[in-house]
Structures are given as structure tokens and as C-alpha cells.
């Protein structure tokens, strides 16, 4: 059974249709890359999955359980949605770290707040705190930030900030980790370090959905690629199906713009590893 | 000079009493206007159009007219219309009327500062909190509030220092604050008359008070400078 199924997701802003009839599914441990030009609805789709936008129509299922159905009022209540969000983690293009907290505190905050809501927190407070801190330090270590845990976001580089943000998203152990153009705000060098971390996650079978403009990365890391254009899925398949046996003219046109840089980009990333 | 030294203790005692009233008005305004300003800020940002329209009209009127006129209208107008003063007589009545005027006036100014502070915190902060399963309440108190406070400290300190000096406007309805106390020695009070230096001397009180405030606020700013 797929870990995630999205069926006929539709979303309009005012009268503009931004998403139309979006359906796809994702297996556990797999990586899905979503590519397409700006304004094609990629980001809106991710935001719908994380309930930052509410789809006008459509169904979202996790492990076969319907967590959202636009037709069913019970699934669209704010209090319900809060719990369901926890199936997903989201890494933003602009990091959105909390500036008043250190890297470690950024990673710990959400889990601490959730732990407080559980019964028996008061009695085991110290123990739980230590557990959460150990997990945060472990995650930051995985991101190669062991020596940066007490730094505030403004003391970190963009690449380091994004890696803290990834650790923060992982702290709640989401079923699916989403990335919204995670390297678009970074220069090529810093891009490499963030992509490196993401590759590492992919090799550990983290289920991920990645919206990206890094074509070489999308092709190398993904098990499945979706090409979006004007709010629709135009092409969907394995990386080789989408990148090499391209069917649609529009996709070919889009990909051709990246062909020229592809060679150099690939080289750059492979030297980084 | 000798005469001034002789008059000094009497004048100081009198100015102290006046300054106490000044400080009372200052603190009452602060305590009233800070929360009221937040309500007005929420009102003006409300998605319910009639509410935001009305609050914006209120803010426009209050910020668009002199505080002195507002003082006079709030103090005298109810009496003129109803035939009897609603604020009660004497110094207490004047103090209540002055407090109402000041709280209303400063709440409107504060509301605009709050609004700027709230709107300057990037939406991404709230979105990051939401996707981490935080409630809106948790996001406000744990994430956005401190960022908002950091941003409003400089304009608030400006406004609060202005408030100290603006309390002198209450002289217009004869509230016995420090200007009134200093001026009383012109006409004659406690055996001293026809001297203007006590009036000038009131400036020292304002200066000291604002010096303390300036230091306090720069300390707060420094405390919050650990993040950006």
C-alpha cells in the first residue's frame, strides 16, 4: 500500500486555477521530485499537502487512511488538521528558522511543546527533556552541525541554516519529508552541502517529496518524477522515463533549457560527494 | 541668588508634589494604553470590514487632532451637554478626565506601532510553526511575540518619552501637575510670588525622568540584540 495517495487535488485562488486534477501516489522510502517552471503549481501542491493551503477538492490518504477529503467536513477542521500535519515535515526555501532560538532550541521546540500536552509530562519532565535534547543533538550531528548547536541562525551560513531546518523538520519524525526549493536561496557551493545531506537522507530510505530546480539532483536521487505545467501533471514516471524518454513536447522544451548546464552541474555535485 | 537659595526648599517641595501627579498620569496612561492599543491594533487588522473601518476612523481622528483639544473636549463637553460634569469635581475629576484623554490618545499611537510590529514578522515564521504542529497560541507566545517586541522597542521608547512631556498638556484643564506647580509661583504661592525660575526648573524633572527611561530602553534593546 502506498504511504501517500493524492487524488484529484484541485485548488483555485480567486478565479485562477492553480492546481487541477492532481493525482499521484508514493511508496514508503521512495523519493518523488516535482519539477516545472515557476508558477506551475509545484509549491502550492506542497503547501496543500502540509495544509498551509486547503484544497477545494480532492482526497489525501496516508497508509490508506483518509486524512483529508474536501467533501467531508470532519476532516477539514482546524483542530483535526493540526494532528494530521504531523504526517508531513516541510523544509522551506527561506529556511524560516526561529531567530531567537539557537540551532539546538530550534530543533527541540516543537517536540517539547508536544510532549507537554501528553499526560505524565510533569512527573518525567527532566527525563523527557534530556531525551528531546539528545535527539536534537543527534540530528544536528547527522547534519554535520555538532559544533554549531549553540549558534543563533544569524550566526550561520545559508547552507547551515537550511541543514538546521532539515533537522528541525525531522525532529517530529514525519512520515513524509517535503522540500520546497530548498536550495533556491543558496549559492552553488552551499547548495552542494544541502544536496549532500538530502542524498544521505534518501540513502537511508527517508520518504521525501522534493520540489526543485536542480535537474541533475532530481534525476539522480528520485525514484519518481512529476513534471508540472499550468497546475496540471503533464508527465509522470521514473527519472529515465521523464528525462530520457520524454513524451510531451512541453516537457522536452522545459528540459532542453537544462541540457546545456547538465554536464557541468553533474560534475560539480559528484566532486562534492 | 541668595533669594533663590532661600526659596529653593519651598519650591522643590511644591514641585515634588506636582511631579507626583505627573508620574501618576504617566503610569496610568501607560497601564491603560498598552493593552487598549493592542485591542485597537487587532481591530484595525480585523477581517470584519466594519470593525476595521471604524477603528481606523477612530485612529485617524485621535491622531489627526491635537491632544490639547481632546483634553478640553473630554473634560468640558459632557458637562455642557448633560448639564452636569460626569467626571466629578476637583482634582480627582480632572485627573480622571485627563487619564481618559491620554489613554485614548496614546492607545491609538501604540496601536499603529503594534500593527507595524505584528505585520513585520514574516508569515514564514507562523507557517514554520504550523507545519511543526504548533497551535496558533503557541506560535504567538513562543515564536512571534518576542520578534514583535524586539521590533517595537525603539518606536515605543520614542512614544513613551514623548508621553512624559505630553503630560504637561493636562495643565490646560488645571490638573495640578508639575507645570501647574511651577507656574503657581508666578501669581504667588506660599509667600513667594512673581518668580518664573520654578517654572523653568521643572525641565530638570523631565530631563531626569527621560534620562532614566532612555537608559532603561537602551538596556532592553541591548538585551534583545542577541538575535536578528
Image (tube, rainbow, N blue to C red):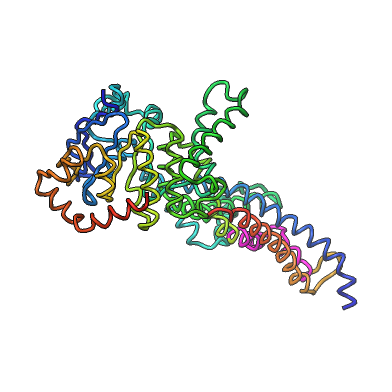
A249 horizontally vs A122: left or right: left
> Which residue: 28% across, 47% down?
A217
Residue B135 in sight here: no
- Nearer to the camera, A267 or A70: A267
- Nearer to the camera, B121 or A257: A257
B9 horizontally vs A153: left or right: right
Which residue occupies the extreme bottom position in the image?
Answer: B1
Horizontal and vertical percent position of residue B57: 42, 53
> Which residue: 46% across, 57% down?
B61
Residue B198 in sight here: yes
The correct choice, above or below, for B148 with respect to A75 in the image is below
The correct choice, above or below, for A132 with respect to B42 in the image is above
> Which residue: 78% across, 57% down?
B17
Using the rendered view, name the quadrant where residue B208 is placed: bottom right
Using the rendered view, name the quadrant where residue B209 is placed: bottom right
Horizontal and vertical percent position of residue B202: 74, 67
- Part of the protein shown in magenta: B159-187
Q: Is residue A172 magenta?
A: no
Work out which quarter of the rendered image holds the N terminus of chain B and state it.
bottom right
Q: Main secondary structure of the magenta part?
A: helix
The correct choice, above or below, for B61 with respect to B123 in the image is below
A95 horizontally vs A130: left or right: left
Amino acid at each position: 500500500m502506498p504511504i501517500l495517495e493524492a487524488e484529484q487535488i484541485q485548488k483555485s485562488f480567486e478565479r485562477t486555477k492553480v492546481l487541477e486534477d492532481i493525482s499521484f501516489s508514493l511508496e514508503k522510502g521512495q523519493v518523488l521530485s516535482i519539477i516545472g517552471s515557476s508558477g506551475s503549481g509545484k509549491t502550492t501542491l506542497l503547501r496543500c499537502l502540509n495544509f498551509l493551503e486547503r484544497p477545494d477538492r480532492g482526497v489525501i490518504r496516508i497508509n490508506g487512511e483518509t486524512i483529508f477529503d474536501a467533501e467531508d467536513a470532519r476532516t477539514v477542521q482546524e483542530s483535526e488538521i493540526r494532528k494530521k500535519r504531523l504526517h508531513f515535515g516541510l523544509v522551506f526555501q527561506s529556511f524560516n528558522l526561529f531567530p531567537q532560538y539557537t540551532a539546538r532550541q530550534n530543533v527541540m521546540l516543537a517536540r517539547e511543546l508536544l510532549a507537554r500536552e501528553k499526560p505524565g509530562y510533569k512527573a518525567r519532565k527532566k527525563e523527557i527533556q534530556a531525551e528531546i535534547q539528545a535527539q536534537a543533538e543527534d540530528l544536528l550531528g547527522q547534519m554535520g552541525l555538532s559544533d554549531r548547536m549553540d549558534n543563533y541562525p544569524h550566526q550561520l551560513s545559508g547552507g547551515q541554516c537550511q541543514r538546521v531546518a532539515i533537522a528541525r523538520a525531522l525532529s517530529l519524525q514525519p512520515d513524509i519529508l517535503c522540500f520546497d526549493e530548498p536550495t533556491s536561496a543558496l549559492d552553488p557551493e552551499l547548495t552542494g552541502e544541502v544536496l549532500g545531506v538530502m542524498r544521505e537522507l534518501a540513502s537511508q530510505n527517508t520518504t521525501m517529496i522534493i520540489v526543485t530546480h536542480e535537474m541533475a539532483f532530481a534525476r539522480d536521487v528520485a525514484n519518481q518524477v512529476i513534471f508540472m505545467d499550468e497546475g496540471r501533471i503533464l508527465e509522470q514516471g521514473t527519472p529515465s522515463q521523464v528525462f530520457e524518454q520524454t513524451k510531451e513536447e512541453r516537457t522536452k522544451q522545459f528540459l532542453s533549457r537544462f541540457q546545456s548546464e547538465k554536464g557541468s552541474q553533474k560534475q560539480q555535485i559528484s566532486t562534492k560527494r | 541668588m541668595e533669594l533663590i537659595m532661600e526659596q529653593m526648599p519651598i519650591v522643590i517641595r511644591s514641585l515634588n508634589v506636582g511631579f507626583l501627579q505627573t508620574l501618576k498620569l504617566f503610569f496610568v496612561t501607560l497601564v491603560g494604553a498598552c493593552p487598549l492599543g493592542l485591542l485597537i491594533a487587532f481591530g484595525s487588522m480585523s477581517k470584519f470590514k466594519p470593525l476595521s473601518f471604524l477603528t481606523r476612523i477612530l485612529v485617524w481622528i485621535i491622531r489627526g487632532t491635537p491632544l490639547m483639544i481632546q483634553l478640553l473636549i473630554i473634560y468640558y463637553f459632557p458637562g455642557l451637554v448633560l448639564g452636569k460634569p460626569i467626571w466629578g469635581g476637583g482634582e480627582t475629576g480632572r485627573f480622571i478626565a485627563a487619564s481618559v484623554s491620554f489613554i485614548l490618545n496614546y492607545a491609538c499611537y501604540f496601536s499603529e506601532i503594534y500593527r507595524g510590529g505584528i505585520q513585520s514578522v514574516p508569515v514564514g515564521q507562523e507557517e514554520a510553526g504550523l507545519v511543526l504542529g504548533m497551535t496558533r497560541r503557541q506560535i504567538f507566545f513562543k515564536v512571534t511575540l518576542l520578534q514583535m517586541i524586539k521590533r517595537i522597542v525603539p518606536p515605543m521608547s520614542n512614544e513613551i518619552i514623548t508621553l512624559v512631556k505630553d503630560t504637561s498638556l493636562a495643565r490646560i484643564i488645571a490638573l495640578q501637575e508639575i507645570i501647574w506647580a511651577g507656574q503657581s509661583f508666578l501669581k504667588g504661592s506660599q509667600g513667594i510670588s512673581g518668580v518664573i525660575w520654578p517654572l523653568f526648573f521643572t525641565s530638570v524633572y523631565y530631563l531626569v525622568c527621560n534620562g532614566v527611561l532612555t537608559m532603561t530602553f537602551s538596556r532592553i534593546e541591548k538585551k534583545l540584540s542577541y538575535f536578528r
